[in-house]
Image: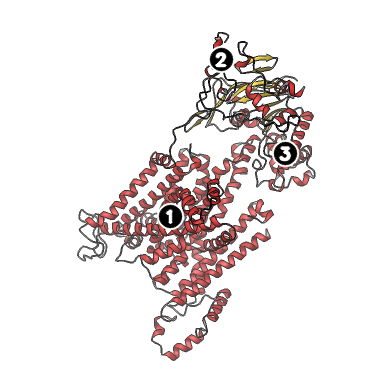
Amino acid sequence: MGKPILEVNNLRVSFKMYAGEVQAVRGVSFTLDKGEVLAIVGESGCGKSVTAQTIMRLIPSPPSYIKEGSSILFDGKHEISKMSESQMQNIRGNEMGMIFQDPMTSLNPTMTVGAQISEGILKHQKKSKSEAMKRASELLTLVGMSNADERLHQYPHELSGGMRQRVMIALSLACNPKLLIADEPTTALDVTIQAQIIDLLRDIQEKTETSIILITHDLGVVAEMAHKVIVMYAGKVVERGTLEDIFYNPRHPYTWGLLRSVPRLDSDKNAELDSIPGTPPDLYAPPVGCAFAARCPYAMKVCKEIDPEHFHVNDGHSAACWLNHPEAPEVEMPVGIGRGAHG
Amino acid sequence: MLKYVLRRFVYMVITLWVIITATFFLMKLLPGNPFGEAAAKMPPENLAILKAQYGLDKPEWQQYLKYLGNVVKGDLGVSYQFPTRTVVEVIKQSFPASLELGIESLALSVIVGLTLGIIAALRHNKWQDYSSMFIALIGISIPSFVVAPLLSLYVGNKWGILPPGLWEGPENRILPAIALAFGTIAILARMMRASMLEVASLDYIKTAKSKGLATGKIVVSHMLRNAILPIVTILGPIAVNVITGTLVVESVFVIPGLGYQFVSSITTLDYTMITGLTIFYAAILIVVMFLTDIVYGLVDPRIRMSGRR
Amino acid sequence: MDMISKDQFQPAEKTTNANSIVRPSLTYWQDAWRRLRSNKMAMTGLIVLVIMTLLAIFAPLFSKFDYETQYLMDTDLKPSWTHFFGTDDFGRDLWTRVWWGTRISLFIGLVAATLDLVIGVLYGGISAYFGGKVDNVMQRVIEIIYSIPLLLLAIILIVFMGPGIKSIIIAYAITGWVGTARLVRGQILLLKEQEFVLAARTLGAKPSRIILQHLIPNVIGLIVVQITFIVPLAIFFESFLSFIGVGIRPPMASLGNLINDGAHYMRYQPHRIIYPTIVFSMILLSFNILGDGLRDALDPKMRK
């Protein structure tokens, strides 16, 4: 792994709404190296999509605001949070590409597939229309579509969901971006198609060495392709580490909860899947202490009073939970996760 | 697509048939004899001859079939008050002026209405939005029969900027076209604004943005086409608006069009003229609606390919 | 950080429920009323309408003149303290006639809109509730009626029935309900799939009971908004017909025929068209503003 392609530091994003300020992202920091796949996991509403879309500045402002002190440094030279809209337009689609969740709605229904792919190429590269179309055809072949030249003239409604997502991927790769953001790329697809799309993404990642930020709540997808993982809850990073750290040695009860809610072949067939009781807090007024305390079975007095900072576990692995404090009582990790189950 | 066109065509034919049938039976309900005042004083033998001539001595269902046949052949009968004039003659004479006025005002309303709607949507919740929508609200609330006299009175008579009436040169076209377009502009502006806002919130606009396209480019090549689609569907009702508007506007500005004819045949109770013109108007409107359905099918690839809606 | 005392690491008591954060709860109608009240435009519309209605009821009662008596000595007077809006070519007092006409127009608007609603809600409700074949047939009928130009149909109906308040109301009732029926049907189709209707049906409630007790209350919001759009439509309908001469005939007054009359005399006596026009436009504008405000206030999707 080489130099960092993206350094996010203390990112805070709020929405000014009719009823007050929603603090959707509350101080997120992470680093993504070149050629690396970083997964951001968490429940819906935890701020992972807002984080991703803010990196491309896709959320309209107003109502969203990047707060003072936030920094998004891209490729060592572009400070995204300070860029003007026209500067962003030169980066979007060119140096960064984005794949959205629902391929049924994220393609324009009245425009041919070829036109939609070549649009970005025409904007960023000095190419003629026919050259752009030729490139679009190559891209469709790259994402595993047969008869690419015919596909170019089809409309999205003539393609299946999986095919459309392939088009979406081709579209995001059009200008060989350095960073690809995939926002729940498989959530809206059938299970069998999900696997194909993940395989495709992994293939492309290996071939092109593009850095990828993968937003998902599906830990299966994470295990398939991520190198590093950050777990988000209520607008904050609660645990970060390598794939192995998070799966084999998780240190935050929220991560435990996420892991226990995934069905596994090797577990007892009759064992019930665990869910995490309760719902995430209202981000109009985030709680004083740890945001997870109200739902945490291990909550201590301190959790409700002071928000924990990250406790260092080992190189690159840290968790924001008081249980990692030396004074805290030893807690047994729930059965079925961590080293025991996989080892 | 063919299936879709056929289905629409069948609806069109049924609707026309319903209207023709309705007018036939309304005519039958009319008290007195079908030849007007003059015939009441005729000797009964002469009346019988006249009735035979028009086939009125036959049973009603035969009369009905004959009437239906005549309408299909394009014979809408003769005027009740002036038996020397056929309805079709009157249409030939006065429809061109109405058609011209209608097209001019429709062009005006599409240009102004869509522009207002687009501006309002792109400047959502800013002063441009509020002022466009206020104009639209006034346009919806103040009908043509109020606007037309006021325009004629102030712009025409008091200030003398444009002629207050008649149908001579191009300067005579301006005020009637504005009066007629007033309400349509409002409907189009409101609809276009809503449609643009709807499209702006869709996912593929975000996709377009993520390609790095400039805002202007996104508006032109992604938003406009998709936002105009639903507008096509209300062109039918808008045509109704324009046609009913001509009744009023032509009367106020004394334009020798079909609307003026229609209103005067209402005042003189020229029954055959009224029903004949109604069938003609209805036919135009229904054909317009049929055509807008086809156009809608053509511009939306989803319908063009599958033939479903 | 390291200064935290040991007892802080005792397990916390489970006191607060994770779901307990609540904003003060308002009923649907309280919430809608709160939002309508904060909408200045809509409230202005409401107040103007109330004033207009009061004037329409009381102005003719307290006037020295009635709407039809002709004073041939006092023809074509300009507005004055005796005749606030002047007089017409028969010497009739226009102040009285304008408010009398407003009363007629509002009356026709309300009655016609009520009929429109009753027919529309029943038709739409039945069509949506039974679904399947019934719905299919009823929708085909609507589709045909929808493509008949209603104003034209109304004109010939009235021409053959003879002009008058009754004919106008009947013509509107026959032709006007289609829009309401479509709207109600759409809404009920949405509601019908929801659990509470399913539950009622499982418990064996009769269709009529389900429609009246469960579905209609849930489309009330929609209907309230619809009323503010149909009443002006019906008023427009009456005035349009009166304007082209098939509606209310003089000496009876209506806003439509007053405007029509005024248009003939406007070159020399602008007051004859100005006052009825202002009253008419204010009524329609207020209804539309109020309708827009109500729609915003009652739309649960916009609820924050």
Amino acid type at image mark 1: Ile
Residue at left 58%, top 32%? A59
Q: Residue furthest bottom?
A: B45
Q: Secondary structure at mark 1?
A: helix
**Residue A192, horizontal then vertical, whole percent:** 75, 39
* Res. A151 visible in picture: yes
Q: Which residue is mark 2?
A: C10
User: Marks 3/2: CA distance?
Assistant: 44 Å
Left or right of residue C108: residue B113: right
Amino acid type at image mark 2: Gln
Q: Residues within 10 Å of mark 3 (few under 14, many from 20)?
A: few
Q: Are marks 1 and 2 in contact (CB under 8 Å)?
A: no
* Res. B168 visible in picture: no
Query: Which residue is at the front of the view, C7 or C80?
Result: C7
Q: Secondary structure at mark 3?
A: helix
Q: Which residue is mark 3?
A: A191
Residue at left 48%, top 89%? B49
Which mark's residue is nearer the viewer, 3 or 2? Answer: 2
Residue at left 55%, top 81%? B62
* C43 lies above or below C276: above
Image quarter for residue A28?
top right
Q: Which residue is mark 1?
A: C230
Give the chain of mark 1. C
